[in-house]
Image (tube, rainbow, N blue to C red):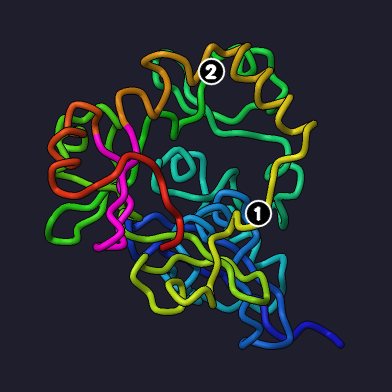
């Protein structure tokens, strides 16, 4: 059947304002299509697709017209915006190669561009991902934005991660989304933590060990867990990560050292 609709759309992350532009050709305006960009798909898994809004901005008579319009909107300047999920200039009509082989990086002068994932400069750590050491946070009013992980407000707990108090789960159809840790469906076991009954293969584990050893990452103070530990409270059905120097105070409040996913 001949495609009837060609449109240009925008998808917005309602939690942090990040956005994505694209073109879609379809016979059914209610087909539920929500983009195919790699960064966008990862964002769906991180924040939950229910926290994204899609707007159809303009219709066209042909897909060529739609892609031409996209090329005028999704420019180099736009994709250099940290809030943009698009990976390359618009107008190409598909990003399979880009999504699977390229990564957006920055150099020591904070110039931002794309390179192949096998680029020696990226593999050596000379060029790093633009999101390295960045975190999406929210304040006590619910405003969300992106800051450096070393920001004093984040380290002090004044600002917390946007997913704090939430967990990524899957339903019986293996759909992934975020829910509150107090969600009755999660507490009852209807929704399960995404890694339940899943394990890395031996090959994957060896690759991870090699990469960490090569980059000297996740060791000493570079370890994201450095100076922290997990504690839990059975009465409160709560499991949290704290700084080790706070451990004694929490023990006095009835917490135990260790981590529990289920209560």
Q: Which residue is the site of mark 2?
A: 127
Q: Which residues are magenta?
A: 229-242
Q: Position of residue 84 (x, y in %)?
A: 45, 49
- Give the residue displayed 51% in from the left and 17% down from the top: 217
Evaluate if marks 2 and 1 touch, with contact meaning CB atoms under 8 Å apart: no
Q: Nearest to the eye among marks 2 and 1: give it.
A: 2
Magenta part, dominant SS = strand
Q: Residue at x 45, y 45 (%)?
A: 78
Is 215 left, or right, of 118 in this rendering? left
Q: Quadrant of residue 244?
A: top left
Rendered position, 251 above or below 72:
above
In the image, 179: left or right of 96?
left
- Among the 4 quarters of the image, the one containing residue 205: top right
> Residue 53 appears in which quarter of the rendering?
bottom left
Mark 2 or mark 1, earlier in chain? 1
Residue nearer the viewer, 191 or 256: 256
Q: Position of residue 138 (x, y in %)?
A: 23, 52
Residue closer to the observer: 159 or 1: 159
Task: Tell me the residue at 53%/61% (across/down).
Answer: 193
Give the percent coordinates (x, y) of residue 61. Answer: 68, 79
Q: Residues within 10 Å of mark 2 (few under 14, many from 20)?
A: many
Q: Is residue 131 left or right of residue 227?
A: right
Residue 64 spot, x, y in % from top left? 72, 65
Res. 53 visible in picture: no
Read off the residue under disc 1: 91
Q: Secondary structure at mark 1?
A: loop
Q: Is residue 34 visible?
A: yes
Taking the image as shown, residue 182 lies to the left or right of residue 158, namely right
* Residue 13 is inside the magenta segment: no
């Amino acid at each position: 059947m001949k495609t009837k609709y060609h449109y240009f759309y925008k998808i917005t992350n309602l939690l942090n304002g990040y956005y994505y532009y694209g073109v879609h050709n379809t016979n059914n305006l209610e087909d539920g299509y929500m983009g195919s960009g790699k960064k966008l798909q990862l964002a769906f898994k991180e924040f939950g697709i229910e926290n994204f809004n899609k707007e159809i901005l303009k219709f066209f008579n042909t897909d060529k017209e739609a892609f031409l319009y996209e090329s005028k909107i999704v420019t180099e300047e736009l994709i250099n915006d940290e809030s943009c999920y698009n990976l390359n200039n618009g107008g190409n009509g598909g990003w399979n190669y880009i999504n699977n082989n390229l990564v957006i990086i920055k150099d020591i002068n904070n110039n931002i561009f794309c390179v192949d994932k096998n680029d020696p400069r990226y593999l050596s750590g000379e060029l790093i991902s633009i999101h390295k050491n960045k975190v999406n946070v929210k304040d006590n009013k619910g405003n969300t934005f992106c800051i450096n992980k070393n920001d004093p407000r984040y380290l002090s707990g004044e600002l917390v991660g946007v997913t704090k108090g939430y967990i990524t789960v899957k339903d019986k159809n293996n759909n992934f989304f975020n829910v509150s840790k107090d969600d009755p469906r999660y507490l009852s076991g209807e929704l399960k933590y995404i890694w339940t009954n899943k394990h890395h293969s031996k090959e994957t584990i060896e690759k991870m060990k090699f990469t960490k050893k090569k980059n000297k990452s996740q060791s000493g103070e570079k370890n994201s867990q450095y100076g922290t530990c997990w504690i839990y409270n059975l009465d409160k059905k709560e499991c949290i990560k704290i700084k080790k120097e706070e451990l004694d105070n929490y023990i006095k409040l009835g917490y135990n050292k260790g981590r529990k996913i289920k209560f």
